[in-house]
Image (spheres, rainbow, N blue to C red):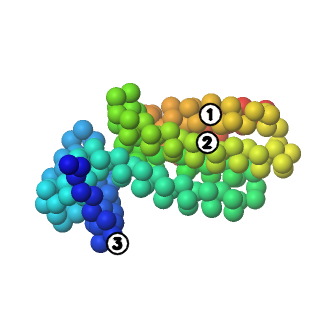
Amino acid sequence: MPARTPSGARADARRLMIVKAALEVVRAHPVADVQLAEIAARAGMRPNHVLYYFASRDAVLIEAVRHAEVQLADARAEALRAIADPAERLRRYVAEYLPDDRHDPVWKLWMEGWLRSASHDEFRAVGREMNDRWRGDLVDALEHAAAAGLPVPADRVDVARRFNVTLDGFAIHVLAGHIGAADAADAAVRTLRAELR
């Protein structure tokens, strides 16, 4: 008999509380050290109560990264569209993409997800969905730049795909403490300018 999934506004509010607690715990600790008991305590619940809403610790973490990314994506798309200057719009995209600092919980969860995506379908599905949204926002910014007369290669999707992979590399170095977020953003923008020439 399949497990019952609680539904309704109260259940949704509890799930959101658990997800936000998970993001706070991930900010404070390496993902491998994050325990369900600590997420539960941060949410003001017992671990078995968390398991009433989520099947496992991994399910909590997957929903945490999905929730955070959806929130970021909605705000990001609106913020980018509001920037008329094409160079500034691209710079803002870079700033939005990279981690805030070494403890950025969404990026820490992505690192964990990438490592496990070969064997974990849910991580892989969330990653694909969010990656598509990021790439779409960059393609839109590149189209805007081309319409403003900047020299943008014709295959915007290919440029976006390659540049996001480059940003992933910068992000890893920010998380490792090899470079600060501001320096990484400056270097990434210089890389993109060279690409657009």
Residue at the spot of label 1: 161
Q: Amino acid at mark 1?
A: Arg
- Residue drawn at the location 65% of the way across and 37% of the way down: 160
Residue at the spot of label 3: 9
Q: Amino acid at mark 2?
A: Arg
Give residue 159's quadrant in the image: top right
**Outermost residue toward the top in this view:** 118
| Secondary structure found at label 3 | helix
| CA distance separating discs 3 and 2 | 33 Å
**Outermost residue toward the right in this view:** 149
Q: Nearer the viewer, residue 86 or 77?
A: 77
Q: Please indicate whether residue 7 sits to the left or right of residue 81 in the image.
A: left
Residue at the spot of label 2: 135
Q: Are marks 1 and 2 in contact (CB under 8 Å)?
A: yes
Relative to 121, say whether 54 is above or below: below
- Residue drawn at the location 23% of the way across and 49% of the way down: 2
All told, the count of numbered labels is 3
**Outermost residue toward the front in this view:** 1
Q: Position of residue 8 (x, y in %)?
A: 33, 70
| Secondary structure found at label 1 | helix
Q: Position of residue 166 (x, y in %)?
A: 57, 32
Give neighbour class at mark 1: few <14, some 14-19, many 20+ (Cα, 10 Å): some
